[in-house]
């Protein structure tokens, strides 16, 4: 199968059934890891099926080495005792602000990160760059943990449809009403879910970018945003180069999920890849032709997809055979061309990190859409 190296961002834990469908087209799928995996990890055993078959590849910026278990204990305790930690950190910020001399956000951040690392005997340097890297690891590792909690929360919300929520809302509002407590709890769940996503998205992207700037990657052909919000951060950087809008190329359908354990998911993915090898190669060739053509001609039919091919239609036909929409649902990737701006350049990656020979003259960005 023609390789189409893809980097998923800013998520750092891809071993989830909502991301498995990406492997049907985006393979190998690269992702960053805040901490290198260990053989004792449950996730490691789940991921081994995908890693051994070359479907995905994780990258750790700088190994935490013997600090690994201490750091993971820190993450677990922050999540389990978040209120206690929040109180401690507020006190630390208050003390920093009241101390004589000049205090900056950077200074306070470094003190907080250093305080947490010292508490768990995590060996670390205190330089600005080292603190930024540890902060990024902390934020991404905690975000991965909260993702699991939010998934469980989302599943609970799916138990209620609009009619049921309306019925709960119409119940009498006595102070001891069970209806009120159920509905209020549901409303609180929605609020918590939405608020946490809004807060985390920007900071997660910044933390992911910090990791990326500390790790060389292979030549990435497709940069794949896990959400529209993450894709918008690339579009914002693209606009600062003087370009107006990215060029939409193609919308490609995928199953909404593949519900099976790791090794059976791998079998389904590989069976689909074998059946669609010719289609996949045709799609990849179209993307590569457009992304390498210089200069880009906006008014040219050759610069749009599909051009003289029906690969996307053939893909959807094969998808319906292997993963019927009635049982597996649908979502999609929308592909955009960033004219004259490879994504590595947009992100200002240092030359020691960016691939020495970028494969494309133009950036190719995919955005994962919501399930339909």
Image (cartoon, rainbow, N blue to C red):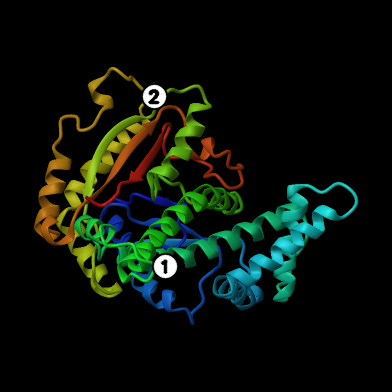
- Residue under the image location 59 percent in, 69 percent down: 82
Asked if residue 54 shows in the view, the reply is no
Quarter occupied by residue 311: top left
Q: Are marks 2 and 1 in contact (CB under 8 Å)?
A: no
Extreme residue in the top direction: 299
Foreground residue among 359 and 21:
21
In the rendered view, does 178 fall on the left or right side of 134? left
Earlier sequence position, callout 2 versus callout 1: 1
Query: Which of these two is toward me, 284 or 327?
Result: 327
241 vs 275, left or right, is right
Residue to which mark 1 is pinned: 148
Residue on which disc 2 sits: 294
Image coordinates for residue 133, horizontal then vertical, percent: 65, 57
The vertical placement of 4 against 336, above or below, is below
Residue 277 percent across, percent down from the top left: 19, 53
Q: Residues within 10 Å of mark 1 (few under 14, many from 20)?
A: few
Front residue (pair 357, 43): 43
Residue 254 in the image: above or below residue 237: below
Quarter of the N terminus within the rendering:
bottom left
Judged from this view, the residue extending furthest toward the bottom is: 40
Does residue 169 appear left or right of residue 82 in this picture? left
The residues tagged by marks 2 and 1 sit, at their Cα atoms, a distance apart of 44 Å
Q: Quadrant of residue 140?
A: bottom right
Helix or strand or loop: what does disc 2 sit on?
A: loop
Residue 109: where, in percent of width, then height? 72, 55
């Amino acid at each position: 199968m023609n390789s189409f190296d893809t980097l998923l961002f800013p998520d750092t834990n891809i071993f989830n059934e909502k991301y498995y469908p990406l492997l049907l087209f985006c393979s190998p799928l690269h992702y960053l890891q805040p901490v290198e995996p260990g053989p004792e990890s449950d996730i490691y055993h789940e991921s081994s099926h995908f890693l051994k078959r070359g479907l995905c590849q994780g990258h750790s910026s700088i190994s935490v080495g013997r600090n690994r278990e201490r750091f993971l204990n820190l993450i677990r305790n922050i999540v389990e005792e978040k209120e206690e930690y929040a109180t401690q950190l507020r006190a630390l910020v208050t003390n920093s602000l009241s101390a004589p001399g000049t205090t900056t956000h950077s200074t306070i951040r470094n003190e907080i990160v250093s305080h947490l690392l010292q508490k768990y005997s995590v060996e670390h340097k205190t330089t600005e760059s080292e603190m930024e890297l540890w902060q990024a690891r902390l934020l991404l590792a905690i975000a991965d943990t909260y993702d699991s909690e939010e998934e469980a929360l989302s599943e609970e919300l799916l138990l209620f449809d609009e009619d049921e929520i309306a019925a709960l809302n119409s119940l009498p509002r006595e102070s001891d009403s069970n209806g009120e407590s159920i509905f209020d709890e549901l409303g609180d769940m929605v609020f918590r879910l939405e608020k946490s996503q809004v807060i985390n998205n920007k900071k997660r992207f910044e933390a992911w970018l910090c990791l990326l700037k500390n790790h060389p990657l292979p030549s990435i052909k497709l940069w794949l945003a896990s959400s529209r919000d993450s894709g918008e951060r690339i579009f914002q950087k693209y606009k600062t180069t003087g370009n107006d809008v990215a060029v939409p190329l193609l919308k490609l359908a995928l199953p909404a999920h593949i519900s099976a354990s790791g090794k059976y998911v791998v079998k389904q993915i590989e069976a689909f890849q074998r059946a669609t090898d010719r289609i996949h190669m045709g799609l990849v060739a179209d993307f590569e032709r457009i992304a390498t053509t210089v200069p880009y001609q906006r008014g040219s039919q050759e610069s749009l997809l599909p051009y003289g091919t029906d690969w996307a239609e053939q893909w959807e036909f094969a998808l319906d055979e292997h993963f019927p929409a009635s049982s597996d649902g649908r979502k999609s990737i929308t592909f955009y061309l960033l004219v004259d701006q490879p994504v590595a350049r947009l992100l200002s990656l240092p030359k020691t990190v960016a691939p020495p020979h970028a494969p494309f003259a133009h950036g190719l960005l995919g955005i994962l859409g919501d399930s339909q």
